[in-house]
Amino acid sequence: MTEQQKVYPVAEEFAANAWADNEAYLSLYQRSVDDPEGFWAEQAESLDWFKAPTKIKNTSFAASNVDIRWFEDGELNAAYNCLDRHLETRGDQPAIIWEGDDPGQDKTITYRELHAEVCRLSNALKEMGVTKGDTVTLYMPMIPEASVAMLACARIGAIHSVVFGGFSPDALAQRVVDAQSRVVITADESVRGGKHVPLKDNVDAAMTRDGTDIVDKVLVVRRTGGEIEWHDDRDAWYHEWVDRQSSECPAEKMNAEDALFILYTSGSTGRPKGLKHTTGGYLLYAALTHRYVFDYHEGEVYWCSADVGWVTGHSYIVYGPLANGATTLMFEGVPSYPTHGRLGEIIDKHQVSILYTSPTAIRALMAHGENIMDSSQRDSLRVLGSVGEPINPEAWSWFHRVIGNSRCPIVDTWWQTETGGIMITPLPGATDLKPGSATRPFFGVRPALLDNEGNVLEGATSGNLVLLDSWPGQARTIWNDHERFVQTYFSPYEGVYFTGDGCRRDEDGYYWITGRIDDVLNVSGHRMGTAEIESSLVAHSAVAEAAVVGYPHDIKGQGIYIYVTLGDDVEPSEELRKELTQWVRKDIGPIATPDVIQWAPGLPKTRSGKIMRRILRKIAANECEGLGDTSTLADPSVVDELIEHRANR
Ligand code: WTA
């Protein structure tokens, strides 16, 4: 039997102590789709409301009127739910355990301490003139101040926009301008794998770009003490502004539909889009999924290894766990530093019960052999989780056997920046596991598979994954561009939300996500728009045209393969290849570093001038047999030329 056909049944003792066994899952799921209003009204009682909602669900997916509201007359504050309500019962329990890049550095912050620090920063932001409804951009390392900053914004009703610390100054500037942030919070440097990344220098560079003069304060956390430039009129030290503030600050009463944050993500075309998430539905969905999917129990240490710059960090390092009063571990570094045993050593050191990580991290470790786990026991582990891309069955088994000592269920969680929280996933006490399958929908989630004409497909089949009805964690719109929100998600198929993913459903009703069916790449679990990389390349004077596709990559899942047509008088060379690689890296950020650049005298195009990416993808994957129909090409000979000089064989 191959790994893919194996089934890992739920252990009885696990089911007996879990939040949900299979029976509970089935009946709660049924209830959630039969009576969404009743189900979510009941779940909403798990949050603390200043004013409890009486209107529960008011949502429309009709393209002519996309309008999504949950709990619309309720009032609450996300930071209050993550902090204040825990003070009486677990004020002295660790809220955040921080593990530094250097194994000798760590820090524990209790709920009481976190509350006080968030209040101080809230007061500092107020002193800077930040008020309810303003946006604040965060460009931070993986340090507790990142969570503090998110919660401080939430506390005073400001909307945070976290930009991943690996993005370039241009990418940062673009997002600051789109969100119109007056305040940016950053650090002098971040530290990863022993290397320092000059965050503040990047902010300085971003602040020279058009439109960023709206920023009047840059608040800087001193992380390393590294040398930075200082602009007296604009820059402010975090410790100078925060330490002198009062540790009390009232939590602003927010409507459930007030924005909590914006988060930018890549689409198939155009610039990154700022998805807007709101307060009540998002928080409830993050908290409920965190509790059920990871079977979180009081007192456990939970570790999500994502970066706070991505949605996974928002929902499952900060909001979900803290709303549930959990102890959330935050790791500054990388799993391979100083040695490949680091991940296991952190688990032992902090007695981690639940580990949520990515296939790409697992594959990177796998490449170094099982012995790397000899330096740890990992006996504290109880549940493992995976997110970001399809997990191949080999990586699944390695995760299960080598990291989890063949003892722990793995929850393979499918979701998106747009969904706010986990959508298709096993529950560890309820779902028999099949390696590579995200299995079944979470409460309230109604997946369906459509053919290209929009017909609903039944039974065991493959198709385009859509969601038939709204759930509370759903993004409400794209910042400044509701039309694009409608176009992207609700126009491809009338009346449903289109995910952009392809998917198979098996005879047990289990879902197997097969990956993006649009022009979005998934590189090491990071979403990259091909159009973004292409427009970066054509901005280089040597480049006439560029086409970017993904190709299978052993560790990253997908690698970035670029076809470049040079300008008339430009000669290809190794130097130019290096220069273009650096160009994209600098323009977008290291995560967009090209893996392969192939010189392409011509690109395969239809007679109407459209690039046939299907063909480019096949050549990049070294699948040159059966390229399918090439008869619509304007010049079929370009294909032979590309095949002959393909770079991946
Ligand atoms: C992919 C990350 C297969 C998918 C939370 C989706 C997955 C995109 C899985 C969203 C999974 C995420 N199995 N594919 N378990 N999880 N994806 O917005 O293509 O960064 O559409 O959100 O990642 O990426 P995003």
Image (cartoon, helix red, strand yellow):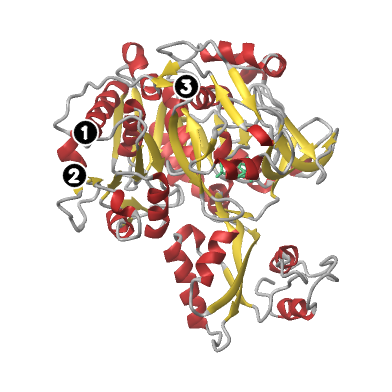
The location of residue 544, given as percent across then percent down, is 57, 77
Q: Residue furthest front?
A: 64
| Residue 351 makes an appearance in the image | no
Give the residue drawn at x 54%, y 65%: 535
Give the residue drawn at x 54%, y 60%: 532
Q: Quick check: 219 left or right of 606?
A: left
Nearer mark to the viewer, of 2 and 3? 3
Which mark is first along the chain, 1 or 3?
1
| Residue 19 makes an appearance in the image | yes
Q: Quadrant of the N terminus?
A: top right
Q: Quick check: 550 left or right of 6?
A: left
Q: Which residue is mark 2?
A: 237
Which mark is first along the chain, 1 or 2?
1
Ligand 1: give its quadrant. Answer: top right
Q: Which residue is mark 3?
A: 256
Q: Which residue is mark 1?
A: 124
Looking at the image, residue 593 lies above or below residue 529: below
What residue type is disc 2 on?
Trp
Q: Are dots 2 and 3 in contact, CB under 8 Å? A: no
Badge 1, how many Cα within 10 Å: few under 14, some, many 20+?
many
Q: Quadrant of the C terminus?
A: bottom right
Q: State the SS at label 3.
A: loop
Distance from Cα at disc 2 to Cα at disc 3: 33 Å
